[in-house]
Image: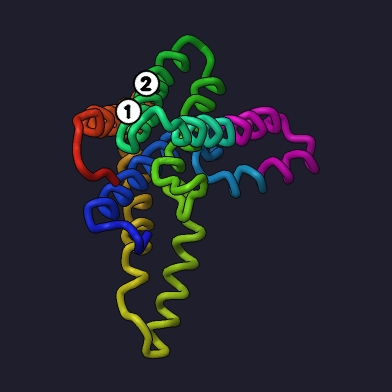
Amino acid sequence: MNRLDRNARLLATGFAAMAGMVDAIGFMASGGFFLSFMSGNSTRLSVGIVESAPYIGLVAALLASFVGGVVAGSLVGRQTTFGPHHRQAIILTGISLLLFAAPFVADAGFLPLALCFAAFCMGMENTLFEREGSVSFGLTYMTGALVKIGQGLATLISGGARLEWVPYLLLWLGLASGAMIGALMFGAFGLKSLWLPAAYAGVFALALFVPRKNTF
């Protein structure tokens, strides 16, 4: 995160907010499951197996969809035939289209599939800042960011660098604020609230298709 320039950090914070929106909407639509926080789903899966809960299949499908999204995003990111900004634009286009389609799929009576669409998108989102085949920070989960905040505060207390932890705080605030927006929107529009993050991803995809010297 600290290796990114200011504009890229702002974009990362914005994409974290998008993930927060999607996660909150999915959490409320599914009755307590996550679309981007797979540690929580892993715990729910394990507890569900022990308790023989009926939701095991849904949680397993969400986990598989998320991993599948990471695979898809990474494969796109490793295509040498595309420039960096075109690779990111393709990923965002996929996210936008799937999030736009999800409410229609749910209305057709396939809510679990719609949720899997969104979880797939969250997996893809985490590959937007992939460098040399690896992701240095997550956009849809904040455990690592909170650890960085804690380490930064420890460094600050011991007299070291003062502001290195701030970008991670902004990343967390982005996700938290996005989740609040998503929860508010779900109360008014239901799963159609996913059209807001779909539009968000679509706008940035269009912007990235425009040739430029630098990309995030």
Residue lying at 34% horizontally and 72% vertically, measured from the top left: 164
Q: Nearer the viewer, residue 81 or 193?
A: 81
- Quarter of the view holding residue 23: top left
Scheme by which the image is coloured? rainbow
Return the mark for residue 198.
1
- The x, y position of residue 207, in whole percent, is 21, 32
User: What's the amino acid at mark 2?
Assistant: Leu
Query: In the rendered structure, are the residues bearing label 2 and label 1 in contact, judged by CB atoms less than 8 Å apart?
Result: yes
Earlier residue among tags 2 and 1? 2
Magenta stretch holds residue 51: yes
Question: Compared with residue 127, is residue 60 higher up or lower down, i.e. above or below?
Answer: above
> Which residue is painted at 44% across and 61% down in the image?
145
Q: Quadrant of residue 81?
A: top left
- Kindly indicate the quadrant of the structure image that contains residue 181: top left
What is the secondary structure assignment of the residue under circle 1?
helix
> How many numbered discs?
2
User: Residue 46 magenta-drawn?
Assistant: yes
Q: Residue at x 40, y 19 (%)?
A: 103
**Residue 170 at what x, y percent from top left?**
31, 60
Up-down relation of residue 169 to residue 122 (above or below): below
Q: Which residue is mark 2?
A: 97
Residue 85 at x, y percent in the picture = 30, 36
Q: Nearer the viewer, residue 181 or 137?
A: 137
The magenta span reads: 44-65
As rendered, which of 12 and 89 lies closer to the eye? 89
